[in-house]
Image: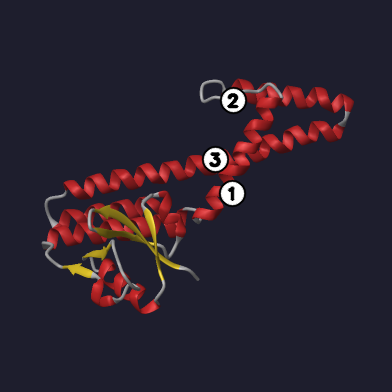
Amino acid sequence: MKLSVNVGDRGEYFEVVSLNDNEGALALEPEIKYPIYSWEVYEYIASNFMDGKTVLIPKYLEGDLNKDLIIVSDNLSELERSKAIAIIKMRDYIVNTRLYNDNMMLIELYKFILLNNWFIDKGFIITEENRPDKYLEIINYSTELMNESSEKGEEVINKLDSYLEILDSITETEKYYHLYLDFKEKINEASTVEEVNNIYKTTKESLI
């Protein structure tokens, strides 16, 4: 297993913004992937990060990263820490229970592009505005082909089925992405720890 964390550029340092226990996190937090070559260092980063602390990694290292070089800041108020922990927990919950891992998402997107290009080559340019009409045209096209060759007609229907299945998956991912952004916005606007806890509880319950 390759160890890594997602980081944001903070000038002289990288700040850890998420862990890569599940690569699907990149769908919600598209940051820089930073490789970690020591399990001890990874555990140190993860334990502090999951505790809501700010973890900074020096950008310019002469040797390997070790625990002594990592800066951990605990200067957060109780409210700010509760916000950080709530965001981490919600992101990980969505990623682990609702999303593909990052590699699967890329494969699905690649298949979708191939199928879309296949339909374009056949003269069917599908957009948000014309989807129902184009789907009907494609079905009628497959019916016409059936008169010539059942194999060719079935190929069209099978490709349309695959296209719609992947589209549903992409739409579902987009839905959870916007839910996560909305959750973060509400959490950041919260003024008490109790409010943060209630927002987290309500949002998680809506996903069950």
Q: Which residue is mark 3?
A: 168
Report the residue at 27% width, 76% height from top.
67
Q: Is residue 208 above or below residue 121?
A: below
Specify which label sits upstream in the sequence, 2 or 3. 2
* Residue 201 visible in the displayed image: no
Quadrant containing the C terminus is bottom left
Q: Which residue is mark 1?
A: 107
- Badge 3 marks a residue whose secondary structure is helix
Assess whether mark 1 and mark 2 are in contact (beta carbons under 8 angstroms): no
Q: Is residue 65 above or below residue 91?
A: below
Specify which label sits upstream in the sequence, 1 or 3. 1
Quick one: label 2, few (<14), some, or many (20+) residues within 10 Å?
Answer: some
**Where on the picture, by quarter, is residue 18?**
bottom left
Disc 2 versus disc 3: distance between alpha carbons? 15 Å
Q: Is residue 30 above or below residue 130?
A: below
- Badge 1 marks a residue whose secondary structure is helix
Q: Residue at the right extreme?
A: 148
For badge 1, the amino acid type reads: Ile
